[in-house]
Amino acid sequence: MRRRLVDSSNVRSVGWSDGTLELEYVNGYIYQYFDVPQPTYAALLAAPSIGAYVNKHIKPYFDVREL
């Protein structure tokens, strides 16, 4: 999946395709979250803190797997 670099102390890059959100953390771990709506991805990119948004709006609600 193509990801874009983001300005975050925790998250290096993010990508979204067909409902799958992919996050690459600065420590090198990559996680995919499933059935994430496109507006949620857009809100993530617009959030003042990407890490805080992920913790509050992504992790509690979407299934995840580590790559």
Image: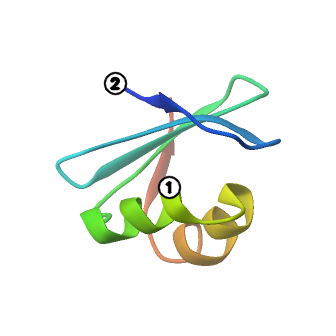
Report x, y in % for residue 10: 78, 42
**Dot 1 amino acid type:** Leu
Q: Which residue is mark 2?
A: 2
Picture layout, residue 38 above or below residue 66: below
User: Who comes first in sequence, dot 2 or dot 1?
Assistant: 2
**Dot 2 amino acid type:** Arg
Report x, y in % for residue 23: 53, 40
Picture layout, residue 34 above or below residue 26: below
Residue 54 is left or right of residue 19, and the answer is right
CB under 8 Å between discs 2 and 1: no
The image quarter in which residue 52 lies: bottom right
Residue 15 is left or right of residue 58, and the answer is left
Report the disc number at residue 30: none
Report x, y in % for residue 54: 62, 63
Which residue lies at the image location 39% right of the left edge and 60% below the top edge?
Answer: 41
Check the image and tell me how it is coloured.
rainbow
Residue 40 appears in the rendering? yes
Q: Secondary structure at mark 1?
A: helix
Figure quadrant of the N terminus: top left
Q: Which residue is mark 1?
A: 45
Which residue lies at the image location 76% right of the left edge and 29% below the top edge?
Answer: 26
